[in-house]
Amino acid sequence: MARILITSAIPYINGIKHLGNLVGSQLPADLFARYMRARGNEVLFLCATDEHATPAELAAARAGKPVAEYCAEMWQVQDRLGQGFRLSFDHFGRSSSPQNHRLTQHFAGRLAEAGLIREVSEKQMYSRADGRFLPDRYIEGTCPNCGYDKARGDQCENCTKQLDPTDLIDPRSAISGSTDLEVRETKHLYLRQSAMRDRLREWIDGKADWPVLTTSIAKKWLDDGEGLQDRGITRDLDWGIPVKKGTEDWPGMEGKVFYVWFDAPIEYIACAAEWVDAGKGEDWERWWRTDKGAEDVRYVQFMGKDNVPFHTLSFPATILGSGEPWKLVDYIKSFNYLNYDGGQFSTSQGRGVFMDQALEILPPDYWRWWLLSHAPETSDSEFTWEAFQQDVNKDLADVLGNFVSRITKFCRSKFGEVVPEGGDYGPKEAEVTAELAERLARYERHMDAIEIRKAAAELRAIWVAGNEYLQEAGPWTVFKTDEARAAAITRFALNLIPFYASLSAPFIPDAAAKMAEAMGVDLAWPESAEAALSALPGGHPFTVPDVLFAKIQDEERADWATRFAGVRT
């Protein structure tokens, strides 16, 4: 039994996330966690809300609430929506937790002792209209690299270039929109990432199995221009983790907080401590410290490509720089973007489908299947309502749902609600079993390698194989002349249902549970296709399940396309 630690990039607290956010981290992480559990491994799957910095403060101000109250309410909303999509976190934490406060301050103290933090007097934008310094994300303007007119003062989300606020063309306050800005002097702490460059390069070079997307972004940040730069880790904000050197005050840093990029990844570790403190687990350090049991842990992170620099460089610099035996990530699965119907998802414009809206119109399995089977692994993907309707109707309704419905209803009409006895499997069943054995092996290889689209295609092919068998074997025709042979065909086909249920559970857990319940079995990963397809003996009772997947009608598709085309109401 392997031990697998899985973290998903933690979502910002500032509102409900859209489907592009979901498929870029949390959903594929859940797929992998469910699969690894099904294979008998010990899994710890962690996620949390990212509650500090500009997005939280601005969202709270718009909501007219204190930021702590706003974050507490939105954590509940995001937790509920995660459960709605069947995200199987072992714990869903909060970066504002006391555990993260302590750990963040601890890491800062260790880095200071190691000489990896320097104090910098710097020029920072001050908004006279707002009466405050403006941290990077409070400033918007035009990117000098690509011309994107909504670049933030820390990074352009369009071209991913790292920026300083003074780099922006025509900067303005993200709070008030005011251009009445001036540069004033303030002091901040910087993590000396440049001093860690060689160690980070050596570490990254040792990850030959990482996706090209992950390593290419990391090496771009290492080498572009003057190479990896030191990075500020404090901000002039009210909301956040107070700057301390371990448990001691940090002279000159009074009233400042740690910058969100510094404390947010540390929440992965703190979340495990929250998991224990919530009574859900024991001994979180055996997952995170190699001197306390984590040396045999495989740690896998899931994230969108915009988060890669922080997870390949900044967070590892924090961990390595601490000089303590913390667990480093083994594999980073990064994703491109999911676009929406010819454009981009837009939280600010309400364009696209958001998690709460998606669950209002269809059950989670519809979304899980389509998003995962179109995961933007090697390039950006595009959601269109036409493709969504076509694929859901074909894959889920016509192939999987239709197979389960046809064979269970046929058996009930001819043999009753029990697996029929009599007859023997013949060459056709042996042929299908051999094909499914090969496909099962390929499916497992793709899932092990986190090749999500390939795994989905193989699972779809496994469903199709059953449909083709049933169509060719035709038990409804054979029954008229050879009842024993029809019984054998029906028994073989019924055995496919729990086989499908177990293999499908990571993708579509609700439908898998319904299939298993209808067949009177527990979900269990098959030891082999041969064993699985003879697991249900003659006389085993079952029930005919309700329709697993209703087809999406043209009028529904047209209505949704109009409804989610613009501003959210």
Image (cartoon, grey):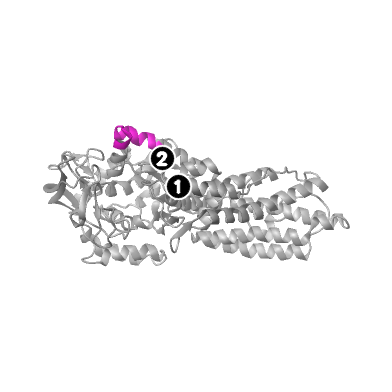
Image spot of residue 53 (x, y percent):
27, 43
* Residue at the farthest right position: 481
CA separation in Å, label 2 and label 1: 10 Å
Mark 2 vs 1: CB contact within 8 A: yes
Image spot of residue 544 (x, y percent):
72, 44
Give amino acid for label 2.
Answer: Trp
Which residue is located at x 50 percent, y 53 percent? 371
Residue 330 belongs to the span the image colors magenta: no
Element type at marker 2? helix
In front of the other: 237 or 37: 237
In front of the other: 301 or 372: 372
Which residue is located at x 49 percent, y 54 percent? 2
Magenta-colored span: 61-75
Q: Residues within 10 Å of mark 2 (few under 14, many from 20)?
A: many
User: Does residue 367 show up?
Assistant: yes
Which residue is located at x 49 percent, y 48 percent? 562
User: Does residue 53 show up?
Assistant: no
Q: Quadrant of residue 424?
A: bottom right
Mark with earlier residue (2, 1)? 1
* Label 2 sits on residue: 275
Give amino acid for label 1.
Answer: Leu
In front of the other: 119 or 185: 185
* Label disc, if present, on residue 44 of the rendered structure: 1
